[in-house]
Image: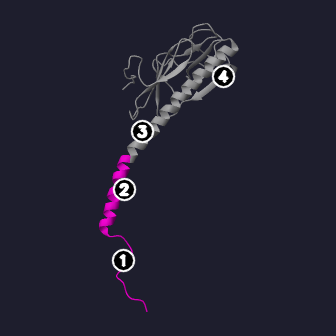
Amino acid sequence: MQPKTNRQDGLTLLEVIITLVVALAMTGYAVPQWSRLVASNRQTATVNQIIGAVQFARSKSIALHRDVVLCPDRGDGFCAASGDTWPSRFLVFVDEERGPPYQLLEPAQILLAGTLPDRMSVHANRDAFVFRPLSVRSSNGTVRVCDPDNLVPPAAVIVSVTGRPRSARRLAGGGAIPCPG
């Protein structure tokens, strides 16, 4: 025969309340951090996709000895005259007409069509970037990638007159990259 003990298997109400308070405090800290991490990854993916498209257009221009255009896609064969905000789709194509308005004459001209990640807004000071073969000046400009929820600071892709892209977190003078709103 075994002796009786007053052993309890379970948690007291106080232990449950303390556990819930700690879990809620950790969740309150973790969720905003997780949201910032996701926004930062989206922004980085967008910047990398734009840099990749610029590098692709520049290399195709050199390889084909032709003008190549990178622009926002209006959806009907023309570059979108964005004014500042780029839609989520973009095109890279050979420019047969050699000048604005930049348009596709036939679908075979498309070298690359892409879609930018959701939940980021893209703004540029050019409606289109034209890349020209070696020793001829290309379009220079800045593409800004902004988080509409302001969870991460803006980033930019800066395209030089030679067509080389670089990413930046600040303007050349050290100021913040401007985003609408």
The CA distance from mark 1 to mark 3 is: 44 Å
For the residue pair 80 and 53, the one nearer the viewer reads as 53
Q: Residue at x 40, y 46 (%)?
A: 31
Q: Position of residue 62 (x, y in %)?
A: 66, 14
Q: Which residues are magenta?
A: 1-29
In three-dimensional space, the C-alpha distance between marks 4 and 3, rounded to whole angstroms, equals 34 Å
User: Height in image: 142 above or below 32?
Assistant: above
Q: CA distance from mark 3 to mark 2?
A: 20 Å
Q: Residue furthest left?
A: 14
Q: Quadrant of the C terminus?
A: top left
How many C-alpha atoms fall within 10 Å of the one at disc 4: few (<14), some, or many (≥20)? some
Residue flagged by tag 1: what amino acid is it?
A: Gln
Which callout, 4 or 3, points to the residue nearer the camera?
Answer: 3
Q: Is residue 100 left or right of residue 111?
A: left
Number of disc labels = 4
Which badge, 3 or 2, is on the more N-terminal residue?
2
Closer to the eye: label 1 or 2: 1
Query: Which residue bears the numbered disc 1?
Result: 8
Q: Which mark is residue 36?
A: 3
- Identify which residue, 170 or 140, lies in the foreground: 170
Tag 1 near tag 3, CB within 8 Å: no
Asked whether the viewer can see residue 13, the reply is yes
Of mark 2 and mark 4, the one earlier in the sequence is 2
Task: Report the residue at 43% width, 92% height from top.
Answer: 1
Colour scheme in use: one colour
Mark closest to the chain's N terminus, 1 or 3: 1
Between label 2 and label 4, give the one nearer the viewer: 2
Residue 63: x and y in percent read: 69, 16
Q: Residues within 10 Å of mark 3 (few under 14, many from 20)?
A: some
Q: CA distance from mark 2 to mark 4?
A: 51 Å
Q: Amino acid at mark 3?
A: Arg
Q: Amino acid at mark 4?
A: Leu
